[in-house]
Amino acid sequence: MARSCRFVASLATLAAALPAYAQTAAEAPADGSDGAIIVTATRSVLPANALPLTIDVIGKAQLDQQTVISGSVTDAVAALTPSFSPTRGKLSGAGETLRGRSPLYAINGIPQSTPLRDGSRDGFTIDGFFVDRVELIYGSNALQGIGGTGGIVNQVTVGAPSREGLSGRVLLQGTADNGFSKEGLGGKAAGLVQYKADRFDATMGVAYEKRGTFFDGEGRRVGLNLTQGETQDSKALSLFGRFGYQLGDTGRIDLIVNRFELKSDGDYIAVAGNKLTGLPTSAVRGNPPGKPAQGRTESVALSVTDTDLAGGNFVSQLFFNRTRDTFGGEVTTQATFQDVRIAPLGTLFDQSQNRSRKLGAKFTYERAVPGFEALTATVGLDVLFDKTEQRLIATNRIWVPPTDFRDIAPFTQLNLALFDKKLRFAGGARWENVQIKIDDYTTLATTTTPRGGVAVAGGKPKFDDILLNGGVIFEPWEGIRAYASYAEGFTVPDVGRITRAIGMPGVDIDTFLDISPIISNNRELGLEVKRGPLDASVTYFWSSSDKGQLLIQNALLVFDVQRQRVEIEGLEVAATVALPIDGLKVNVGYAHIKGRFDSDVIPDGKVDTDLDGVNISPDRLNLGASFDRGPIAARVQTSYYLSRTFRNDPPRAPLDRRNNFGGYNVTDASIRYQSGSLGGLTLAVQNLFDTQYIDYNSDTRLATDPFSNFAGRGRTFTLSWDYRF
């Protein structure tokens, strides 16, 4: 920490001499009267610099640039955020974390995650064409309710049209691998139409994308994960609608609907690799059994807002969300699904499907306290009902029993500004009142119970806790601020993995400890400088949870949930500098994250083993340069994923050392020309130098599985044309 403290001191000295810098309205996702950034995920109209939080906003231009390079919003976030795990390039985001914990994905504040049986498809619930910006809030917090233990990734959709009449935009895009092979070709077409007539407005859009086969840096097909699902060799269809009506001068009602489906084509089967020799898993043409993996999300949200209701800001949302995630079948039968009552041992094929429905409401009211305008108060209420199950769809068996989740959470926040807003104190509390209901059920047959699983008594376990947060912000000069904060986040463990893994008779859900909630805290110290040509920040954070959630591989190569104490700490550094050449900027980002857990069979509350690559991201250094002047916009960026050796006490066996991470780096580039009347043309190259590497997730998990040694995608070209009218 000594080095980071010296860096902070030097940064503050340099920044004090720089002229004040205000972010322009064009760069801001939303703005107040003074042009300050308003981040909707914070559930406050106070500017971001008034809150003791580490916040990033990825604007529309930057988001579009990154999605042309990599193809998805999740990949864009991961590329720009050093403390976010490198993505797997699969439909499933299992093992992808923010600050070593799972983030909450949301669309306009509506949760997309399904923690009761986490299928990890929440990063693919809307096409990036309909996303206006992404708001990132780092670290455990309960601002949006359940699930934000690693932070919040809030995707804010396209806003209502501001001009009368008809407007819109279209996108045509083509993608090719380095060899321009027919099977590696992909394409995308998208359109959005907006109409405004007096107080009424409507927005409707459709996006369709066909992805081809992926090839690695050596021209070999990238391997398939048939069970978890793929983005390669797939088709995706996204439908979006927004309909609004202005209520008086300050009120508004909006109805937003979204449907997204990504489905594998099922044209290939996996070919085994070899981790000992470094041979990646690959693929050949074939017909995998069962239904191809797919993810489908349908959501409807109705919001009523008023920016001047009794002198305050009122926001309400009612929402419905339904997901159906199908996991593909394996070429070989899975031992987990065998039941001799149905078919001889080793011959029974099956595959699973997660089904989840959410119904919820959010209410927030914020205003300055009358007679004491320096104090801003917020009160709110969140209500969420979630019903989730996991079925085996070939035999219509229940793997994870239907689980009902109910959460009622009132909350309040206070923000006090002193000394002309140079000093602020912020804090609040949220009361989580949760009930989980599971009826009596019987687990699947196992090798020890081949003629039927064990009977489990259902129950209605309840949990309630008050989650606290607080912080102080000191901004002695405009654009320079320091802050310290403490916040608690809340989620439930992957109840589905726990309930389906019960193997002993006599278990009663009401007294089964392992479905108690995960409460994680986050403490951080930060310094930010936004003056003149410099935009920089340094953050040190540390967090812990007494009953954290870890994914641990069992003998069948399936990951089960284990509950142990977890401690994580890290350092984040980011800086962007505008150079004397007009339009030219360079940036650097660095994240160092270390996590450990209590691995003792009988926990003693002391952490002794490093979190592995399934549960934490590697250290990373990001370097980039961008140029934006006139009709030309260009960027080149490199991510260095640094090597890591995982340790425990006592030292782990030699076999486990196969999961140590060797490190790699990847460079991307993009250039765009904007014509005034003909639209914009963008050429992007992912993995510019065609680097051959095994991705982080594959390199650090399943050391003996030849079907999980996936290489990263090789050089890939994308040509995109977009037009606004």
Image (spheres, helix red, strand yellow):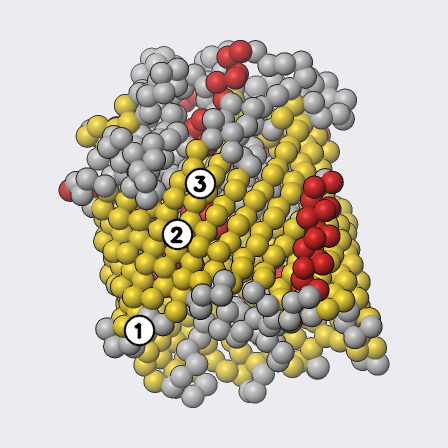
Query: Where residue 724 is drawn, which disc sits there?
Result: 1
- The tag earlier along the polypeptide, 2 or 3, is 3
| Residue 509 shown left or right of residue 275 in the figure | right
* Residue at x 57% of width, y 81% of height: 251
Mark 1 crowd level (few <14, some 14–19, many ≥20, 10 Å Cα): some
Asked if residue 279 is positioned above or below residue 302 in the image, the reply reads above
Distance Cα–Cα, label 3 vs label 1 = 31 Å
The local secondary structure at tag 3 comes to loop
Q: On the image, numbered disc 3 is attached to which residue?
A: 87
User: Residue flagged by tag 3: what amino acid is it?
Assistant: Thr
Distance Cα–Cα, label 2 vs label 3 = 19 Å
The local secondary structure at tag 2 comes to strand
Choose top left, top right, bottom left or bottom right for residue 288: top left
The local secondary structure at tag 1 comes to strand
Query: Where residue 636 is drawn, which disc sits there?
Result: 2
- The tag earlier along the polypeptide, 1 or 2, is 2
Of the residues tagged 1 and 2, which is closer to the observer?
Answer: 2
* Residue at x 35% of width, y 79% of height: 195
Q: Residue furthest left?
A: 182
